[in-house]
Image (cartoon, coloured by chain):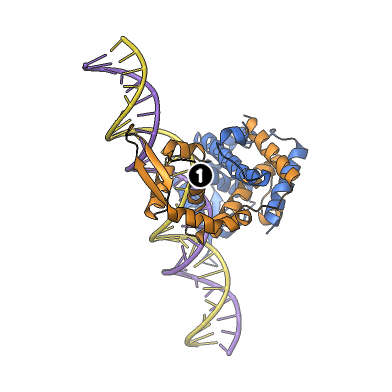
Chain colours: A orange, B blue, C purple, D yellow
Amino acid sequence: MGINERINARFKSEHHKAIVNIRYTSNWMMNRQNNQLANFGLSLPQFNILRILRGAKSELNIKKVKERMLEQSPNTTRLIDKLITKDLVERRRCDSDRRIVFLKISKEGEKLLDRIDPHFDEINLEGSLSFEEAQTLNALLDKIRADV
Amino acid sequence: MGINERINARFKSEHHKAIVNIRYTSNWMMNRQNNQLANFGLSLPQFNILRILRGAKSELNIKKVKERMLEQSPNTTRLIDKLITKDLVERRRCDSDRRIVFLKISKEGEKLLDRIDPHFDEINLEGSLSFEEAQTLNALLDKIRADV
DNA sequence: CAAATATAGTTACCTAGGTAGTTTTTGTCA
DNA sequence: TGACAAAAACTACCTAGGTAACTATATTTG
């Protein structure tokens, strides 16, 4: 369904429509992804943190985790708290620099990701665009942000 | 700055990168828009509701307002409450159907929008894409959502 | 070496969206 | 007409991101 049919709105220009469309599509996707991940007891950002930790060769401190996330707000701490409560992540205080906190995915965390892996492509809508279309989309989005 | 430089992340595919890029760009835009609107004491969704009410020929009930918004959650009520507290919107109970609440932008609300109008294009990044590019972007975003 | 500065992480308080359930009022229909 | 269903608005409770301020520790520097 095109955004025109979906939203009973008037747009000032094709560009304005695109700006609104980005937000609409982003919300739409996040909603979809959150619903799918809810079956595994995770939210999208919690899932992403787990994947970052699995992808790391060694333990990561919170700063490194933040650098690999879209959002770099202090909420990372709270999100990690929730993962620790669920026994999906382990936390360890660094000995040589006691400010630093090291994080590691737990066995249960890895098992959970293994269960989600077969659904990853579907969660990320893989296949809805061709390679060339995805390239074009990335270029256009980067161009919008480059404008400033 | 391309998303590759910005996020220290690995993408499974060009398509996966595009999916993440949509969310990243959406967050980036919303953040920017919220910062600009904060100068006028508004958040982005509050601003959008005000514009919807101004664009209406007559009073609108809350349901109609929701239909013109991206999000149709019960938060609309709360957002409107805030606008009423700021004296930017007026609320009136319908006489013939007492379930319905009518909304109207106030004089102050119109004055505030008048002050924001000159900045509208800048807030919406008008000009960052050509007409054709915006068209392409809209088509690609619609295609992603059509996939399901 | 002591004071100032920087860094890692956290907390508080603001914003917002989503689902589910509630209240009030209206419409339906057996 | 009297029970039931639908609709409009609202509330509670969950999620999350953003800014600013704060704590604890480490580094710099005068």
For the N terminus of chain A, the image quarter is bottom right
Q: Nearer the viewer, residue B138 or A65?
A: A65
Q: Which residue is mark 1?
A: A52
Q: Secondary structure at mark 1?
A: helix
Dot 1 crowding, Cα within 10 Å, few <14, some 14–19, many 20+: many
Q: Residue at x 66, y 51 (%)?
A: A9
Give the number of marks. 1
Q: Residue at x 50, y 33 (%)?
A: B39
Callout 1, which amino acid?
A: Ile
* Rendered location of residue A97, percent (x, y): 34, 32
* Rendered location of residue C17, percent (x, y): 53, 52
Q: Nearer the viewer, residue B135 or A16?
A: B135
Q: Nearer the viewer, residue D11 or B8?
A: B8
Q: Is residue A43 above or below residue B44?
A: below
* Rendered location of residue B28, percent (x, y): 57, 38
User: From this viewpoint, is residue B60 visible?
Assistant: no
